[in-house]
Amino acid sequence: MRKWAIIIAIIGLGILLAMLFNNPVKISSLEKMRAGTLVSLQGTVSKEKESSFGKTFSIDNIPVFCECKKVYANKKVSAIGIVEDYYELRVRVLEIKIIDS
C-alpha cells in the first residue's frame, strides 16, 4: 500500500508542477473558456463579498474566488488562477498582487 501511495503522490506532484510551469492565458472574459484552464487577468476589483471559505469578487466583471484575507475592493490587481465551474464559470485565484493602491 505504501508503494502505491508514493507512486500516486509522485504522479500528483508531477501534474501540479506541469500546471505551475504552464504559461497562463491572458483573458478579458470567460467566454469560450473551459474549466481547468490556467488564466491570467488584470483589472479593478469590485463587488467584494466575504464568506466563511474566502472572498468572492469581480475583476472587470469576471467572477473570482480567493481564499485570502486582504481587502482588494477598488484596487487594481493582477491575478493568476484556474477556471472552475461552480454553478457558473469563475476563476479560483492561485496568486494575486496589488498593482496600484
Image: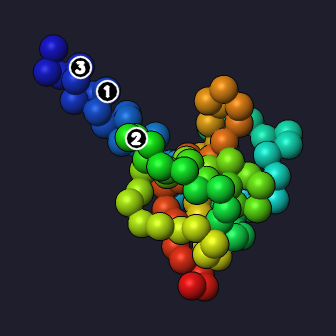
Q: Is residue 22 visible?
A: no
Which quadrant is home to the N terminus? top left
Upstream in sequence: badge 2 or badge 1: 1
Q: Are marks 2 and 1 in contact (CB under 8 Å)?
A: no
Direction from residue 1 to residue 91 in the image, left or right: right
Q: Residue at x 23, y 19 (%)?
A: 4
Residue highlighted by disc 1 = 8
> Which one is nearer the viewer's eye here, 61 or 13?
61
- x and y, in percent, of residue 25 in the image: 72, 57
Q: Nearer the viewer, mark 2 or mark 1?
A: 2
> Which one is nearer the viewer's eye here, 6 or 52?
52
Q: Is residue 20 above or below residue 84?
A: below
Q: Residue at x 41, y 57 (%)?
A: 68
Direction from residue 14 to residue 28 in the image, left or right: right
Residue at mark 1 to residue at mark 3: CA–CA distance: 6 Å
Q: Is residue 72 above or below residue 63?
A: below
> Which one is nearer the viewer's eye here, 17 or 101?
101
Residue highlighted by disc 3 = 4
Residue highlighted by disc 2 = 53
Q: Is residue 63 above or below residue 86?
A: below
Label 1 neighbourhood size at 10 Å, few (<14), some (14-19), many (20+)? Answer: few
- x and y, in percent, of residue 10 in the image: 31, 37
Q: Are marks 1 and 3 in contact (CB under 8 Å)?
A: yes
What amino acid is labelled 1 in the image? Ile
Please tell me whether mark 2 sits on a helix, a strand or a loop. loop
Please tell me whether mark 1 sits on a helix, a strand or a loop. helix
Q: Is residue 92 visible?
A: yes
Upstream in sequence: badge 2 or badge 3: 3
Label 2 neighbourhood size at 10 Å, few (<14), some (14-19), many (20+)? Answer: few
